[in-house]
Image (cartoon, rainbow, N blue to C red):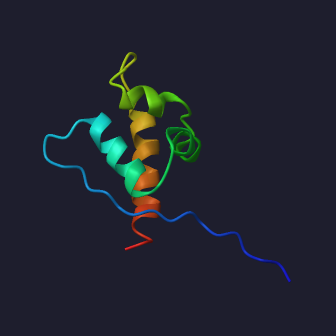
């Protein structure tokens, strides 16, 4: 009997008005018990998550990196509510 792989499921975290990317990432990670490394692996963008949380936005996040982050938050966030 084969056991199906479970998809990761996360709590959805809505950005607050005027909230920085750094603060949002910290809230999202804390709510879902993720490390920066884990979130980087899930998004496929690696260690850049840790830099963003520390306001090291040089180079600034690309649209593709932001889309990868949004995809994780949207795909998995909706499955836990």
Image check: 56 left or right of 17? right
Decide: is 64 above or below 16: above
Residue at image position (44%, 71%) is 79
Quadrant occupied by the C terminus:
bottom left
> What x and y, as percent, mark residue 11?
39, 63
Decide: is 12 above or below 3: above
> What x and y, as percent, mark residue 45?
54, 35
> What x and y, as percent, mark residue 67?
41, 42
Image check: 48 left or right of 14? right
Residue at image position (45%, 35%) is 65
> What x and y, as percent, mark residue 26?
35, 42
Residue 4 falls in image quadrant: bottom right
> Which residue occupies the extreme right position in the image?
1
Residue at image position (47%, 62%) is 76
Front residue of 52/35: it is: 35
User: Number of callouts in the render?
Assistant: 0
Residue at image position (32%, 24%) is 55
Front residue of 54/78: it is: 54
> Which residue occupies the extreme top position in the image?
58
Residue 23 falls in image quadrant: top left
Quadrant occupied by the N terminus:
bottom right
> Which residue occupies the extreme bottom position in the image?
1
């Amino acid at each position: 009997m084969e056991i199906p792989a479970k998809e990761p499921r996360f709590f959805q975290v809505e950005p607050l008005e005027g909230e920085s990317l750094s603060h949002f990432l910290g809230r999202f990670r804390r709510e879902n018990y993720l490390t920066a490394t884990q979130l980087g692996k899930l998004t496929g963008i690696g260690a850049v998550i840790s830099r963003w949380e520390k306001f090291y936005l040089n180079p600034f996040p690309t649209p593709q990196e932001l889309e990868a982050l949004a995809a994780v938050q949207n795909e998995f966030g909706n499955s836990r509510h």
